[in-house]
Amino acid sequence: MEEIDNPPPRSRLAAKEELSVEPTETRSVSSISDVSQEKNVHKHYTTIVVGAMPANGGVVLAGGPKIKESHSRGTISRSQSRSDPPARGSHRTEREHKSKRNTHMGTSSGAVRTTSGEKRYSYTGHRAYSSNGTDDMVGRHRTHRGHGAYGRTTSDLHIPRQDAVGLDDENFESRMELLRDDHYDEEQGGVATMERRRSDHAKTLCMIMGWLVAIVFLVFLALFFLEKNKHISLLPTRMVEVTAPPSVAPSGAPSASPTWQGDHFFRLLPESSLKAITEDPESPQRKAYDWLVVDSQVQTYSSSRLVQRFALATFFHATGGPTHWNRNSTKRWLSSAHECKWGMATSLQAGILVDRDNNYFYDMHDVSGPCTKKITADDVRDEEAEEELVYEYLWFPRNDLVGTLPPEIYLLTSLRILSLFGNPELEGSIASNIGALTNLEALAMSYTRLYGSIPEEIQACSNLSGIMLSGTGLKGTIPSLGNLSSLQHLFLDFNYLTGQIPSDLPPLMGQMVLAMNHLNGTVPTEIWSLDHLYELDVRSNELTGAVIPNELHQMTSLKYWHASNNLLSGELIPTSLAIMTNLRIMSLFQNRINSTIPSDIGLLSNLTLISIRDNDMTGTLPSELGLLSLCRWLWLFGNKFVANIPSEIGNMEDLVELRLNNNLFWGSVPSELGQLPLLYDLKLNDNAIAGQLPSELGLLPDLNLMHLQNNQISGIIPTELSNLESLAELQLHGNRQLSSSIPSELGLLSNLDVLFLDDCQLNSTLPSELGQLVALELLSVSGNELSGSVPLEVTALPSLIYFNVADNRFTGNVPVLTSHHSNNGTSKAALEAFNISHNGFVGEIPIELCTLDATVFQYDCSKSLCGCFSCLCDSRIPVDAFKIWN
């Protein structure tokens, strides 16, 4: 073993400085002798083992701060450590931290041996790995100054080699004592400084924690008020204070609003909805929003579901749901249940509309609810299945809805059917965002109170097959319809639409009903090329041009053709008309058509109504009319037709109404008309028809009206007319060639209520049998040559309100309609006319008649007729000067 020289004594200051010198590296000691025995170690002592020696010749001591050392042949024995430990928590020196970077400590037990292998000391301690890779043993020691992260012990002191070796015990002890005292003072000052630092750190930490708690509290407080008034804090427009939720709320809804993404919801709404929510606390949108935010499940709804519930809630409040709806069928509305289970109208009808063939325009037999899927028990339990349900049928026809149609219904972008027709107290407009309803198949709002126009955006609803907007009050022009490739049914009648009919029409168009508007221009020729068009109704507009184009090639599907009350002109082209083989109704009345009826009309065997009245039609009626066996209504009055009435009309066995009045027909009434068993209305008046009335007219059992007045009919009134049990009106007045008596058999017409025989040449008396006509209300026989007295049976008719016997030769007392007067002279029923002027009545006018208005009671004064104004009986004033009625 290398011999260590003893250095000369140094001063305490130099020793202190040298002892504080930190070595830069360590090396192994070659040998250690005379290790102190285990019996000298006190239980409070710290074991010291020389494990490594500094490079400058010093040794590293591990142990307590007070060390008793002996130097003998290069050995160092451990001594008793200081008994009073310093405070815990002292900081380690920089030396210690550096040494910890150079060593890796591990627990071990064993014995220290010399280089010769002799076992000198048993211990339990730490194994230290020196920087040169050798294993050096540092004994486990018990420290009095703490062994924590910031603890420091004097066992870590490094003594220069030249000072540690060669000192006697006393000098060494003195120097070590001095070193330990100074180091202890140093440690005590460091402990106090550390305590102050720790106190400062604790205060800083407490302050930081306090601020954090305050910030967290303020954040939670802000979130609470934000959620309570979230729509105020999130909207960019002027806010108003949120009112309490409405009375109608989801069952079990919490009193406070749950946390939800309100800003995201507002981004889903149009500006008009946001404005209504923020500016009007009483608006339907605001009430719907207030209801929605307290929904206990609002956090679970998808975006589409949020909008769906909001739109339906707005519709409920806007249309009088809380006060006008039938709560028996809609009591689940605004409940916590899925909106698809809220229900529809009071009753689900079979379809939207019934066409002229009694077919459903939109069949609803298979529709069980307003949503896509049928809600089963499994769906109710499966929240995901409910979330997929979308609202497709807003079905409230004829449901007495009131209020305003909210534009939020157009947020229901999955709608297939929007049916609100038949609610006349519901008003609103068709919003431009209707274009968002790309799935819409039927728009039915007829007979509601809509204002504004039809927006151009409706062209985006490419799946529309039906538009029903009749009787709504819409104005403006009809937008282009060419993009609506699926459109089949268009009902825009009874509105205030102007402009021209668009020429770009959907190829599948089947019904086009534009009646009762202010449309002008011509009928587009493109209409006549629509293969599927079966109804064209443009009546009561201001259309001009030809009533029908020169050539038609593809109109075989047309069944109903209404073009009446326009300014159409031109001719009924035979070749074009013959193509319409499926035509059932041809209504062209009140136009300027100057044409004849072509004989090809007989090819239209399916015709049931022909109405060309009030035009400038001329010529004769073709006999081919007799081929129209299915025709029920033949209205040709108000034209200039001439010649005889074709007898072939008698072959139209289904004919119900034959109206040929106000023309220039001559000839006689065809007896073949008696072959029409279903004839109900026969009007041949105001023509030039002559000859006698055929008795065959008495063979019409269903005849209700017979108007033959103002012709040149002669002869007698056939008694066979008494067989017309259904006859209610018989008008033969104005036939001055009719010179016979009034048949008493007419008293058998028990249903007769109108009998006009004025201005004929009827003679004889007024039959008392007419007193059997208990239903008779109007009786006029003026301008004839009737004589005798008025039968009391006639004046006693209970229903008579019009009595005109003027300008005849009646005599006797003034008749009184006894059924209309009580004993005190007051009238029981209102009379329309009581005319007895220009007859030979004598005596006083009954007091009962004096109470009648002068416009009702018509008579002339004479010496023979007085009363009411008794002075007139002796007056020489001409009678005509006192006529009440001319």
Image (tube, helix red, strand yellow):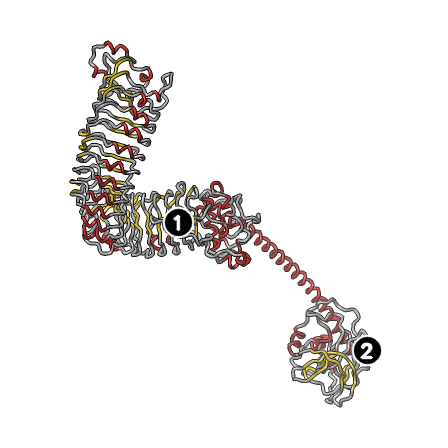
Look at 24% across and 15% down and name the residue there.
861
Q: Amino acid at mark 1?
A: Ile
> Which one is in front, 7 or 757?
757
Q: Amino acid at mark 2?
A: Val
Look at 84% across and 80% down and name the residue there.
39
Per the model, the C-alpha gap separating discs 1 and 2 is 110 Å
Badge 1: residue crowd in 10 Å (few <14, some 14–19, many ≥20)? many
Residue 845 falls left or right of residue 433: left
Tell me if I can see residue 862 in this picture: yes
Circle 2 residue: 41
> Which one is in front, 302 or 374?
374
Circle 1 residue: 352
Badge 2: residue crowd in 10 Å (few <14, some 14–19, many ≥20)? some
Position of 814 relative to 547 (above/below): above
Please state the horizontal and vertical placement of residue 746, each as a whole percent of the image: 28, 29
Position of 233 relative to 59 (above/below): above
